[in-house]
Image: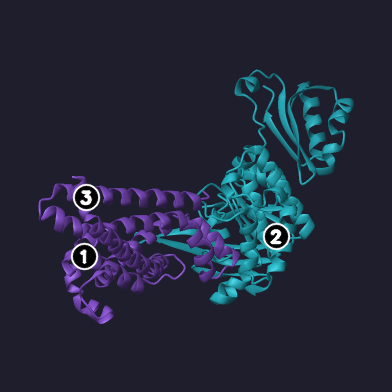
Amino acid sequence: MLDSILNILPDLNKAFFETLYMVAISLGVSLVVGLPLGIILFVTDKGLLFENAWIKQIAGILVNLIRSVPFIILLVALLPLTQLITGTTIGPTAASVSLSVAAIPFFARLVETSLREIDKGVIEAAVAVGATPWMIIREVLLPEAKPGIVQAITVTAISLLGYSAMAGIVGGGGIGDFAIRFGYYRYDNTIMLTTVILLIVIVQLMQVIGDGAAKAVNKR
Amino acid sequence: MIEINDVTKLYKVKGKEIVGVKNVSLTIEKGEIFGIVGYSGAGKSSLLRCLNLLEKPTSGEIKIDGISITKLGKKELREERLKIGMIFQHFYLISAKTVFENIAFALKAAGKTKEEITSKTNELLKLVGLENQKDQYPSQLSGGQKQRVGIARALANDPKVLLCDEATSALDPNTTKSILSLLKSINKKLGITIVLITHEMEVVKEICHRMAIMQDGEIIESGDVYNIFANPEKELTKTFISSVIQMDLPEPLLKNRKGTVIKIQFKGAIAEEAVVSELFQNFRVKGNILHGKIEYIQDTPLGIFIMELVGEEAEVKRAISYIESRIENLEVVKQVA
């Protein structure tokens, strides 16, 4: 048994870094795009800084649209876009495109939720002070929602880890794909178990780090 | 300083119109502490929030220092708000920022430089007595300390007006006292006009110069705090006053009295005069004091006594008319049988 694990080690190692690569890129993109989107979803709501029913509706529908498509379908449907952006439709970089697209609305909704938890009075107090909306976003909304946003990053990262298993469809590689190909299709329980344990360890690690970070930034 | 001109605020809830504030007109003078009293739902909070346009009045005009704020554009309104401080029942501090940063936030909003912000914030910390807490987070503070931060933040840009939205309602009696005396000293020292709303008559009695009572969105009575305490007209006003000045006699006690029971109210300087002792010198009546109290409102005494006069009927009558000639507020609670 040890032998077979040692045998797959180089492959597993490669898969590990592919996973890391895909999760890192798509997490990065979803933060950069999803955070502003989440803020937009929140501040355009009724009675808030940039109340705007149109933008709120359009952003909301767009987010729901992407979120309702099963990832495996999104992965295939986005192949033209992937080709356009990365110049290829296979490999971890290509897979990162659809992973990002799936993660953006997911993360945006989580950001919106954590912004919603801020006491409206705190926002109102900032308005009463005479602060500009931009200043309120930067100095009130984001700091107050920080613990929630850190949690959202953790949840998104873990979800991305799960989704990345499906990246195998487009040859994305990664641990999940590795588990399916070697463990599931070849009925190799040792490999299956090893990869699953590895995934469990990674998820645990992400959660612990995420929780720690959320606690560190929480001043409430 | 503040002119409220026929302001009405209507809310739409599920298609139905609900009246928040109804045709309120009020003038608040520069440098005074003005209290608006009412039960929850009376519209006092809506009215206060109209003063810095957190709520936009449905109709009417509000002028602050000659500027019609109901007509300002977004940017001008923001600039005007720098000059209108506000504190809240639940403080509403930014929990992710330290005490220092919370106060600095208001100065940043006014576009002050870093040096200005640091020196002004330190000055404000001193004013509210929180120099030692400047690096703490709001969650580490007591309620009273949080409200002090709120006050410092509200005063950051040297406002002309300070609005207090039930500022002491979440605090215990001792802390309430200390916050009220802080507000009082700020009013004196900085000459800021303070408008506060409360359901606690005690607060009004403690620090307000003038007051208004609100019911169902309307102001039903307003005027000098002392005069309202001495001569309340509306039923609701009387109820509010009796919450701080309890003067009712127990029913059985009143029943067993053989003489005439009278209630005398001494106002101002007269409270210090020896009307009662003169009464007993000049008339052949005996008096039992059943209840007595002198309240100081705005440092002016307001005395209330309930007395039983025992003696010949004619003498008692003459004694009463003597008191009537000296004191305007006399009430015969129980005539002799």
Task: Give, as a three-letter code, the residue at label 1.
Answer: Ala
Q: Colour of chain A?
A: purple
Give the position of the N terminus of chain B as an image quadrant.
Answer: bottom right
Q: Is residue B126 left or right of residue B39?
A: right
Please tell me whether residue B296 is drawn above or below residue B59 in the rendered image: above
Give the position of the C terminus of chain B as an image quadrant.
Answer: top right
Identify the chain of the residue marked 3, using the numbered disc in the image: A
Task: Give, as a three-letter code, the residue at label 2.
Answer: Thr
Q: Is residue B50 left or right of residue A165?
A: right
Q: Position of residue B331 (x, y in %)?
A: 70, 35
Residue that carries the numbered disc 2 in the rendered image: B121
Residue that carries the numbered disc 3 in the rendered image: A5
Residue that carries the numbered disc 1 in the rendered image: A167
Q: Position of residue B83 (x, y in %)?
A: 66, 67
Q: Nearer the viewer, mark 3 or mark 2?
A: 3
User: Could one spot residue B32 in this view of the protein?
Assistant: no
Q: Colour of chain B?
A: cyan
The residue located at (68%, 60%) in the rendering is B155
Extreme residue in the front direction: A3
Marks 3/1: CA distance?
A: 23 Å
Task: Give, as a three-letter code, the residue at label 3.
Answer: Ile
Please tell me whether residue A28 is drawn above or below residue A152 in the rendered image: below
Q: Which mark is residue A37?
A: none
Identify the chain of the residue marked 1, using the numbered disc in the image: A
Q: Position of residue B53 (x, y in %)?
A: 55, 66
Q: Nearer the viewer, mark 2 or mark 1?
A: 1
